Image: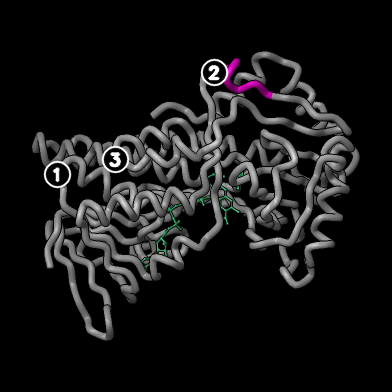
Amino acid sequence: MRTKVAIIGAGPAGLLLGQLLHASGIDNIILERQTPEYVLGRIRAGLLEEGTVALLDEVGAGTRAHREGLVHDGIELAFGGSRHRIDMKAATGKTVMIYGQTEVTLDLMNAREAAGLTTIYEASDAQPHEFDTDHPRVSYVKDGAAREIACDFIAGCDGFHGVSRASVKPQAIRTFERIYPFGWLGILSETPPVSHELIYNNHERGFALCTMRSTHRSRYYVQCPLDDHIDQWPDERFWDELKRRLDQKAVDHLVTGPSIEKSIAPLRSFVAEPMRFGRMFLAGDAAHIVPPTGAKGLNLAASDAHYLAVALREYYDEKSSAGIDAYSATALARVWKAVRFSWWMTSMLHKFPDTEGFGARIQLAELDYVVGSKAATTSLAENYVGLPF
Ligand code: RFL
Ligand code: PHB
């Protein structure tokens, strides 16, 4: 088999890149280790920047998001017993959209199928080869048989634990990492959200986030110890802990119900440099991870896919390598700003082992400054709605 771009991974980065390339007439094949059902079952991100929605529109996959997504003009920060609204639309003219990653993935999968493009699911042992030459290829196993795709370029869109980044010689890559000493325990429930906008709570018992997937489906997170296990968190314990971290008005409005999904995610910041190795590019979580506090992971996967698609279009249409040569630096400039923002939001809102006394007072002073200063509010808002790309 031969294609121009072999994409490893059918998550948001790989699926969006595939559609963007197709829109430019660049043929591509996606290899995915899991089944489509497995990919669609992963409850992850929920918040899209306008730029991400525009990319879905660009590939004709944005119709349902506009119909079903919830557009939010602001968020609330709760600390010291009261809530403060950040009006992002007033500060930046921009909004964000609540639309789940599961839905984004489904819309992109449907668009791919409608376009008749090849996705090979349940492809095991994918391995990129010879990407430092002009004839890269990807080997894999399907239905017990060894197969291979010859290509011009490889796009490693295979997430944090993927094979692409792991295939690079250690001396060719540099990584930067911060591991946070806690995780997020999240639940999804078929209950109306406690408030029509997101509430980020700084509390002495730990961080809590009230978010949603729709007007009848809520998503809540509480900061938890890294070594906690789901079994230690029956629904009653979760709701009880959440209530302890919310302001009184939120507690009064909270509707609880059985969880339909429950999971614990560790928090980390991670960046690999560069994002290009000869004829292989990394995009999305394969290259970088952010803690979910800033809601940037999926949105960064989308901006990487955009930069890479533009670079490859330039390569094929204009016979110029300038775009692919600049891809890594261009993408990393945006990535690092999102890494900074996510780290800052995480630092300001969570309980750290040393957030006693002095540390806690500094967090409250910072939050008070953020909600009280027009400059600080605008800075948070312009990062939250997404820096331009
Ligand atoms: P993904 O989604 O991990 O997809 C990678 C795909 O590659 C496949 N794969 C392979 N395929 C073939 N061969 C191999 N060897 C392979 N190895 C892996 C995998 O099966 C998978 O299908 O990466 P991608 O596409 O880069 O997308 C990144 C996003 O999924 C991620 O950044 C977000 O979910 C992060 N995130 C959030 N991002 C936001 O923008 N807004 C949010 O509100 C938000 N909330 C979150 C989040 C992530 C969370 N968790 C669980 C980590 C909330 C949570 C709790
Ligand atoms: C979510 O809806 O899952 C979500 C929203 C905002 C975040 C993190 C997660 O910062």
Of badges 3 and 1, the one in the foreground is 3
Decide which of tag 1 and tag 2 comes sooner along the chain: 1
Q: Mark 2 points at which residue?
A: 92
Which is the main secondary structure of the residues drawn in magenta? helix
Residue occupying image coordinates x 51% and y 43%: 99
Q: Mark 1 points at which residue?
A: 25
Residue 344 horizontal side relative to residue 201, left or right:
left
* Side of 316 where 307 appears, left or right: right
Considering only vertical position in the picture, is 187 above or below 362?
below
Q: Where does residue 89 sit, x and y in percent of width and height?
A: 57, 20
Q: Where is residue 311 in the image (x, y as percent from the top left)?
A: 23, 38
Q: Is mark 2 on a helix, strand or loop?
A: helix
Please tell me the numbered disc located at residue 59: 3
Is the CB–ligand 2 distance for label 2 below 8 Å?
no
Is the CB atom of the residue marked by disc 3 within 8 angstroms of ligand 1's nearest atom?
no
Residue visible at 40% across and 56% down in the picture: 11
Rounded to the nearest angstrom, the CA distance separating label 2 from label 3 is: 26 Å
Of residues 306 and 360, the one nearer the viewer is 306
Separation of disc 3 and disc 1 at Cα?
Answer: 12 Å
Estimate the x, y position of residue 150 in percent, counting from the top left. Answer: 14, 65
Location of residue 117 with respect to 36 vertically, above or below: above
Q: Earlier in the sequence, mark 3 or mark 1?
A: 1
Residue at point 80% right, 45% down?
A: 254
| Quadrant including the C terminus | top left
Instruction: Give the residue type that dot 3 points to.
Output: Val
Q: Residue 259: x, y in percent? A: 70, 61
User: Which span of residues is magenta-colored?
Assistant: 86-91
Q: Give the distance between the C-alpha atoms of the residues marked 1 and 2, in whole angstroms.
A: 35 Å
In the rendered structure, the answer to whether residue 387 lies left or right of residue 28 reads right
Whether the residue carrying mark 1 lies under 8 Å from ligand 1 is answered with no
